[in-house]
Image (cartoon, rainbow, N blue to C red):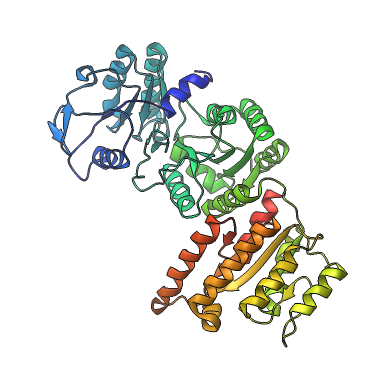
Amino acid sequence: MGFDFEEIDAIINARSMAIVGASAKPVKFGSLFTATQLTFGFKGPVWLVNPGEKEILGRPVYPDLGSLPEVPDLVYLTIPAHRSMDTLRDCARLGVKGVIIMAAGFREAGAEGAALEGEAMRLAREGGFRIVGPNCFGIYNPRNRLALLPGHDFSQTPGDVAYISQSGGFSVHVGRQCKGLGIDFSAIVSYGNGADINEIDLLRYFAADPQTSIIAAYLEGTSDGRRFAEALGEAASRKAVVVWKVGKSESSSRAVTSHTGSLAGSARIWEGLLRQCGAIEVSGVDETCDVLLALKHLGRRPGRRLFLVGGGGGLGTYAADLAEEEGLEVPTLRADTASRLRAVLTAPGASVGNPMDIGTPLVPIPVFEAAMDEASCDPGTDILVFDLALNFGYGLGGEEGLDAAADVLIRVRRKSGKPVVLVLYSRAIGPEDLRFEEILRRLRTRLLQDGVMVYPSMQRAMRALALVNA
């Protein structure tokens, strides 16, 4: 139906909504979404529609859209595909702006479903409304409190990252994982089959959206390669764009067709297109979130020169291998930097260089702070990376020592202005070691809030730094 910023904006920033198929029965799709949306607290009116219900969660239920006090901006359909057409006719008649069709059973299900999808599009064109879906989880927008299914516990803090996804499940996974990393969203749109509003429209929308600085996407395919390339190139010329493209193998491309009815396309063509357009290609939820974390704290191309520091010679050697395999640099320290560090790190076992071994995972805090101060001032490196095995550090300094080390890294980050990455993990992973996991999560949250990036492994840290420098 063509790109129109205002039409898409009216859906993402809807001011009123109706849930058709709202239910009080726990096993129903409409029940889960109704509870999710009401818990999340949409800022406008929410009307519940179901001819078989009178009241749900203390709210009145209307028999149909025509019985509502006013026409809603947005209608969520949580009813089966074959029952959706009558409601879409009501939407066309009433002048609804947007409809989100959550049910599967359309194009991805075969010829009969494709016919239903075609009829839905005909009704949308005639009625002048836009469709998100079908076969999707909807929209998350912390500004007006639209909720994904399920997304009752998502962050309510607006941010500047937009995520578009053909997979409902991955839209939830990325949203929830990013919440724990302090990454906030302008919106997440799960668009499923993309029968109407699709990846091309959403790229163009978020490229123009003033609330969005970073765009990330999970894609199974595209409906129009040429128009997609144009939209991607335009978006990537204005903002950082991160793309996770699946369906590259023969078996996964078959799965893509049955999932959303998309055509996956050649892996080589996709990789070349993403590279040519300047997008960052990632793989998986973890790598998506890792790159978004680096973009939040560093932006694009922050520098490839790393200063690697840890409490053990093997750690630094491994980190240096990983860095160079990823196309990063581990330069030799300047002579004056090395001289100042040798004056600080005098204990047996310490070794000054790049990578640098401070001797043990935790050294006395005054020594640690002096060493980190000098390391951060080295003009020949762009990013300071420190490796800390939490369980070893705990054995040397207890929880108090770990907190003090975190304080040092925060102060160094603020004082020097140089990006600091902490690779923080625990090798104690038995059920009796849950305390370490609690300490790790608490430290990670505090460090991230104060501008120190935290990754759970050196491999993931090096990969993320390499990708944002690509």
Farthest residue in the right direction?
335
Which percent across, then down, holds residue 366?
65, 76
Kindly tell me whether residue 421 is visible in this rendering: yes
> In the visual, does 197 lie left or right of 298?
left
Q: Nearer the viewer, residue 250 or 404?
A: 404
Which quarter of the picture shows residue 401? bottom right
Above or below, 116 against 145 in this view is: above
Rendered location of residue 460, percent (x, y): 61, 60
Q: Residue at x 33, y 32 (%)?
A: 43
- Tell me if 322 is positioned left or right of 261 in this view: right
Residue that extends furthest to the bottom in the rendered view of this protein = 348
348 is higher (above) or lower (below) than 388: below
Q: How many marks?
A: 0
Q: Is residue 362 left or right of residue 379?
A: left
- Looking at the image, residue 246 sits to the left or right of residue 129; the answer is right
- 373 or 442: nearer the viewer: 373
In the depicted structure, whether residue 212 falls above or below residue 306: above
Q: Position of residue 343 (x, y in %)?
A: 79, 79
Residue 82: percent from left, percent from top = 28, 28
The residue located at (24%, 32%) in the rendering is 21
User: In the picture shown, does residue 106 fall above or below 464?
Assistant: above
Q: Nearer the viewer, residue 434 or 108?
A: 434
